[in-house]
Image (cartoon, rainbow, N blue to C red):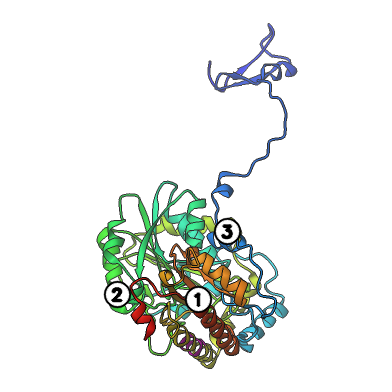
Amino acid sequence: MDPYMIQTNGNGNLASVLDVHVNIGGRSSVPGKMKSRKARWSVRPSDMSNKTFNPIRAIVDSMEVKPNPNKSMISLSIGDPTVFGNLPTDPEVTQAMKDALDSGKYNGYAPSTGYLTSREEIASYYHCPEAPLEAKDVILTSGCSQAIELCLAVLANPGQNILVPRPGFSLYKTLAESMGIEVKLYNLLPEKSWEIDLKQLESLIDEKTACLIVNNPSNPCGSVFRKSHLQKILAVAARQCVPILADEIYGDMVFSDCKYEPLATLSTNVPILACGGLAKRWLVPGWRMGWILIHDRRNIFGNEIRDGLVKLSQRILGPCTIVQGALKSILRRTPQEFYHNTLSFLKSNADLCYGALAAIPGLQPVRPSGAMYLMVGIEMEHFPDFENDVEFTERLVAEQSVQCLPATCFEYPNFFRVVITVPEVMMLEACSRIQEFCEQHYHCAEGSQEECDK
């Protein structure tokens, strides 16, 4: 029977209206012939929600430990520069938001990729001869986290894999695995200021590799790649024909003895989706303004990837319109002195923290060059009271009321991460408490008594 034939009952050429039913694909639509279904409640979470796992939340929430009631809590664990109130954004940034709100122009829906004028401002701000940009190359997002999510969603299908740094920002894995994308971890080398192990990285690439994530400057390491190292990373991507997702949310947040190189300025042939935002450099993470910059000078992404990003952006219709309206003034009016003062403070705190922790037996901090963090190695053989970095940091809270993130959160056991945005007096106190803690628990390893006696 024709799958769309109308079947009639009766002898006449015209059926009674009530007798007409449609046979679709050979199945009758007569209610009496429908398969019976016993109605019952059966509401279950989706596969996507079941596959969504945030290791930081899982580890931190499972720490059933209370701080020492005799010592005030010092948290060096939260990557939010606004927590202690010592790093406010610039008044020009706040005024830009007030002006945008008072104008009454930004109360409605914007295009899902952002207002054209706002995208033009971002393109102009990041444009340079080595990596030219136009408004069509910019997509505004709800924070850098959504920018990363859209990039992963447009580049990778379930069953494909992406290359992620270890140690690295945990959100990459959280997002990818929720989408059914496999995560392969490439190693960063602490003895080389967290440079990538390029041979190991390249060995992970196969026919299912959809993209390489490069985070520079790094969370959690606070490292900044040299130009020569970035060029070697690009050479691997070019040789293997793997596009890059460049997480550059800490772009330009490097200390005075270092230079930040946007990845796209160093390559003409590797297609790059660069993710950034206002959160860290302008110290307003709660404003949720991010962006994707599409660098595709050889037209490898073509229209398909661009169109795909536009379609994906239509799922939530873009970021806050008021922040979009403020972008022009934020980018043009924020004084250089604000950026300079922020970096000077971070550099001072980083030096202070590194110097203090490097002097503590059993700890091996790695000097940072930017961002807001530094990583500290724990020589676990000297701390037999603890099984691993999670136990070490738990007891640090219980005994000294100092909280650091165990680097197991970043797939890198026996390290911990320190956030360097706290006020200087708190940083000094925290380092003093960490020293006391380590001195109380430090033991000489077998066969090294002579070293301990020195």
Which image quadrant: the C terminus? bottom left
Mark 2 touches mark 1? (CB < 8 Å):
no
Counting from the top left corner in percent of width and height, residue 165 is at 40, 64
Q: Is residue 340 magenta?
A: no
Q: Residues within 10 Å of mark 2 (few under 14, many from 20)?
A: some
Q: Residues within 10 Å of mark 1 (few under 14, many from 20)?
A: many
Secondary structure beneath dot 2 equals helix
Q: Which residue is mark 3?
A: 58
Considering depth in this image, is 23 or 382 the residue closer to the camera?
382
Q: Type of residue at label 3? A: Ala
Residue type beneath disc 1: Ile
Q: Earlier in the sequence, mark 3 or mark 1?
A: 3
- Give the residues drawn in magenta, as a range: 346-351
Q: Quadrant of residue 333?
A: bottom right
Pointer 2 with pointer 3, Cβ within 8 A = no
Spatial distance from mark 2 to mark 1, Cα to Cα?
A: 27 Å
User: At which x and y percent is residue 228?
Assistant: 28, 77
Q: Position of 55 compared to 398: left or right? A: left
Which mark is first along the chain, 1 or 2? 1
Q: Residue at 54% x, 70% y: name it.
A: 393
* Residue position marked by numbered label 2 in the rendering: 229
In x, y percent, where is residue 75? 60, 76
The answer to which of 438 and 314 lies nearer the viewer is 438
Dot 2 amino acid type:
His
